[in-house]
Image (cartoon, grey):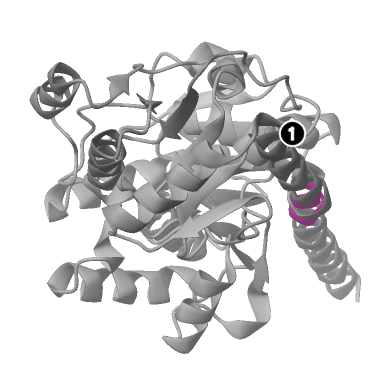
């Protein structure tokens, strides 16, 4: 029987957009891969990756203890049913609850801390509880991957993860063949594109205010937003608020796209003024790989993708005026200078963020677990014979 590996995440969309390369690599290496995530319209695309799929209901943003206990029971049932050799966990609730269940069942766990989430922004009882749960959940993990050095150092300083099992990944990595440079669009004004869930923490409000500032300065540019609206999050931007901005004429909302490459290709610069605790934002990796200059905040995860003044500009978090200044610099560049800046970003992506780096580290971690299990089984058989 093949070695079974389970991958657990909070949306099937996440599996398709961020974990496709890893799943295909695991399947190609002969592993029996089972994906567990809530059911949505992306399930067919998950199955097309060559893995099995099992649904699970996750209250992603809720803090109701009863619903979380039910989730623990769901994870317990699924792991007992499947008996995997190891599980791979992403996002907060799988990282915490699935890990705790797996440890109880003596199933090795590989965690991925892809940013810290809103619980680490707003100090209080929830922050304290999450830290305690992380400390329990990661205490016996086989490997804990982080997507930036800031998060890694924070978890080690607070003793939320054991020192010996931590490692650093270049975000989720990027498929450099799928995301390739394309010619810049031929248009008279610069188009800025912000790709994110529509959350205040992602700097959407600062982007809108920066657009206002530039318009008041007489700078002509196209300010576009792309991403999920009305998401389940306390920091979500409402459809009414977006409608107000659109009516004002300050930004354009492009909705949601399953072909983000075409949207990036139509942009002259990708923007993410986030003060959310990011891992390494995927949209920035995609923009860099497609040779688009970037304007983002000088904050954890975001700053890792950009060389300030070389492949883009870094701005101060929560500072619309500084953001406007940096966007204004992009507008003032010659088209050839924007292209040169984008190519610097592509070179950085090729050097540091190739998806194959991520896949190699995961396969090595899985191989180490399987070899350790094989040795344990062999030792057990030898002991019985003696």
Of the pair 67 and 301, the residue shown nearer to us: 301
In the rendered image, residue 358 lying in the magenta stretch gets the answer: yes
Residue 285 in the image: state x and y as whole percent: 62, 42
Q: Quadrant of residue 277?
A: bottom left
Q: Mostly what secondary structure, the magenta segment?
A: helix
Say left or right for 9 vs 322: right
Across and down, in percent, residue 254 comes to: 36, 16
List the residue tagged with mark 1.
175
Does the rendering let one see residue 93? Answer: no
**Residues drawn in magenta:** 357-362
Question: Which type of secondary structure does the marked residue at label 1 adopt?
Answer: loop
Placement of 344 over or under 196, stated as above or below: below
Residue 246: x and y in percent read 19, 19
Q: Nearer the viewer, residue 145 or 279?
A: 279
At x 53% / y 40%, what residue is drawn?
A: 332
x and y, in percent, of residue 103 in the image: 50, 64
Above or below — where is 373 with respect to 362? below
Q: Nearer the viewer, residue 277 or 208?
A: 208
* Position of the N terminus by quadrant: top right
Q: Is residue 361 magenta?
A: yes
At 65% from the left and 14% from the top, the residue drawn is 48
Between 307 and 156, which is closer to the camera in this rendering? 307
Q: Going 83% across and 52% down the picture, which residue do you hit?
A: 351
Q: Is residue 114 left or right of residue 29?
A: left
């Amino acid at each position: 029987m093949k070695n079974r590996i389970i991958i657990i995440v909070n949306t099937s969309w996440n599996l398709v957009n961020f974990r496709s390369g890893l799943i295909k690599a695991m399947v190609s290496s002969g592993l029996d891969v089972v994906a567990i995530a809530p059911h949505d319209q992306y399930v067919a695309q998950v199955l097309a990756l060559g893995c099995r799929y099992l649904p699970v209901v996750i209250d992603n943003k809720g803090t109701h203890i009863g619903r979380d206990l039910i989730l623990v029971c769901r994870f317990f049932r699924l792991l007992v049913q499947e008996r995997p050799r190891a599980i791979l966990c992403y996002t907060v609730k799988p990282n915490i609850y699935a890990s705790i269940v797996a440890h109880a069942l003596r199933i090795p766990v590989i965690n991925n801390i892809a940013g810290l989430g809103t619980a680490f922004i707003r100090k209080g009882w929830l922050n304290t509880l999450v830290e305690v749960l992380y400390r329990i959940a990661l205490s016996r993990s086989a490997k804990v991957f982080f997507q930036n050095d800031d998060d890694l150092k924070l978890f080690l300083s607070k003793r939320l993860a054991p020192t010996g099992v931590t490692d650093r990944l270049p975000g989720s990595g990027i498929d450099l063949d799928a995301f390739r440079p394309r010619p810049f669009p031929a248009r008279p004004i610069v188009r800025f594109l912000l790709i994110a869930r529509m959350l205040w923490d992602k700097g959407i409000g600062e982007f809108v205010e920066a657009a206002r500032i530039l318009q008041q300065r007489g700078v002509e540019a196209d300010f576009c937003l792309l991403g999920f609206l009305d998401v389940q999050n306390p920091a979500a931007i409402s459809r009414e608020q977006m409608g107000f901005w659109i009516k004002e004429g300050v930004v354009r909302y492009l909705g949601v796209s399953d072909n983000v490459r075409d949207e990036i290709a139509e942009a002259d610069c990708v923007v993410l003024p986030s003060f959310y605790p990011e891992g390494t934002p995927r949209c920035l990796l995609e923009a860099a790989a497609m040779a688009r200059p970037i304007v983002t905040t000088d904050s954890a995860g975001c700053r890792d993708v950009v060389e300030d003044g070389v492949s883009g500009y870094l701005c101060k978090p929560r500072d619309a005026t500084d953001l406007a200044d940096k966007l204004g610099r992009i507008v003032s560049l010659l088209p050839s200078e924007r292209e040169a800046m984008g190519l610097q970003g592509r070179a950085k992506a090729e050097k540091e963020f190739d998806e194959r780096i991520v896949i190699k580290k995961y396969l090595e971690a899985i191989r180490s677990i399987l070899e350790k299990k094989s040795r344990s089984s062999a030792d057990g058989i030898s002991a019985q014979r003696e």
